[in-house]
Amino acid sequence: MGAEFRQALSARGLAWAVGIPRHQKVYPRDVELVFPIGGRGRPRKRHVPNVRSTSAEDMVTQAKWRMLAWRKGTKGPLKARFAAVRVRVADGAAATDR
């Protein structure tokens, strides 16, 4: 899912969920954009996250995993381990900020 599509869903107040590649860079849900004050050079024009991004795989390793069964198959219940983590995808500024 592209950034503009996700932002449009959120702007409409719609809840959405998505699976992402393990190498996708993400931020924790509570990330904030701050305006850093530099010592020298040109002043910054854009806000930056207050924490560094990490891979989705690293974020999920800290999650609580649960075994879930979703239906019965011919050889018994179909089940696997799942984890859900709320993150913010590290894909740049919102379309309105560009």
Image (cartoon, helix red, strand yellow):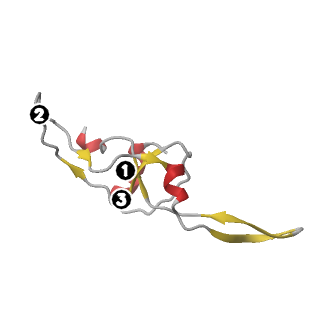
Instruction: Estimate the spatial distance between the alpha carbons at disc 1 and disc 2, rounded to whole Å.
Output: 28 Å
Question: Height in image: 62 above or below 50?
Answer: below
Secondary structure category for the residue under label 3? loop
Give the residue type that dot 2 points to: Pro
User: Which numbered dot is residue 7?
Assistant: 1
User: Outermost residue, top direction?
Assistant: 41
- Give me the residue at 50% from left, 50% from top: 56
Q: Please tell me which residue lies in front, 9 or 35.
A: 35
Disc 3 residue crowd, few under 14, some 14–19, many 20+, Cα 10 Å: few
Residue 12: mark in rendering: 3
Q: Is residue 65 left or right of residue 32?
A: right
Mark toward the viewer: 3 or 2 = 2
Res. 70 image quadrant: bottom right
Residue located beneath label 2 in the image: 43
| Side (left or right) of 87 relative to 58 | left
Percent x, y for residue 22? 56, 46
Q: Nearer the viewer, mark 1 or mark 2?
A: 2
Which residue corresponds to the image point at 41% horizontal and 44% vertical from the top-left? 3
Q: Nearer the viewer, residue 78 or 85?
A: 85
